[in-house]
Image (cartoon, grey):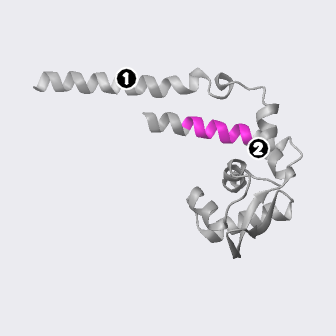
């Protein structure tokens, strides 16, 4: 049941983010780009591409494609890694920072708007009925 509720919340969040992106000046960003942008919001010093890929659970090549597109749009930049001259870090630009902060400040939605009770209740109700039926069957056979 918890997995179903998390899936409903995740789907609603992605839908809300997609709607915001469509009406924002960031029309070249897709929800998939959040895999690269979101961790960087928490890491102002930037992160290596391999670190971003690991955090997102994707290959370095896939993360590289996302970062390339974001760099082309001016959302991220590659800078020298101060810990290793052979490596580089990816970090948000000022434009990239707005892709995370603007939806938060612009949102007039509440959790109840995004996850109306009608969408969650059937999952909860179904699980409770299933549990009662299982318990009743176990008692009668025992």
Residue at the limit of the structure toward the bottom, as seen here:
86
Q: Secondary structure under badge 1?
A: helix
In the picture of the structure, the residue carrying the numbered disc 1 is 128
Q: CA distance from mark 1 to mark 2?
A: 37 Å
Marks 1,2: beta carbons within 8 A = no
Q: Which residues are magenta?
A: 8-17
Image quadrant assignment for residue 61: bottom right
Residue at the limit of the structure toward the right, as seen here:
25
Pair 1/2: label in front: 2
Image quadrant assignment for residue 65: bottom right
Establish if 133 lies above or below 63: above
**Quadrant position of the C terminus in the picture:** top left
In the picture of the structure, the residue carrying the numbered disc 2 is 100
In the picture, the disc for residue 16 is: none
Establish if 19 lies above or below 59: above
Where is residue 92? Give x, y as percent: 79, 55
Image quadrant assignment for residue 133: top left
Is 58 situated left or right of 82 in this image? left
**Residue visible at 66% across and 66% down in the picture:** 49
**Residue visible at 76% across and 58% down in the picture:** 91
Where is residue 52? Give x, y as percent: 63, 60
Magenta stretch: dominant secondary structure: helix
Establish if 109 lies above or below 15: above
Is residue 27 visible to the viewer in this orientation of the structure?
no
Nearer the N terminus, badge 1 or badge 2? Answer: 2
Whether residue 132 appears in magenta in the rendering, the answer is no
Of 45 and 28, nearer the camera is 45
Is residue 42 visible to the viewer in this orientation of the structure?
yes
**Residue visible at 33% across and 27% down in the picture:** 130
């Amino acid at each position: 049941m918890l997995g179903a509720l998390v899936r409903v919340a995740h789907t609603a969040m992605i839908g809300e983010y997609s709607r915001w992106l469509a009406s924002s000046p960031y029309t070249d960003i897709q929800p998939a780009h959040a895999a690269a942008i979101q961790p960087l919001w928490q890491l102002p010093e930037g992160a290596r591409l391999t670190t971003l890929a690991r955090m997102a659970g994707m290959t370095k090549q896939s993360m590289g494609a996302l970062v390339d597109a974001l760099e082309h749009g001016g959302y991220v930049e590659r800078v020298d890694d101060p810990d290793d001259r052979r490596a580089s870090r990816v970090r948000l630009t000022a434009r990239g920072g707005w892709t995370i902060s603007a939806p938060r400040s612009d949102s007039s939605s509440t959790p109840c708007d995004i996850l109306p009770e009608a969408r969650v209740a059937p999952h909860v109700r179904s699980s409770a009925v299933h549990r009662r039926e299982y318990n009743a069957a176990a008692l009668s056979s025992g």
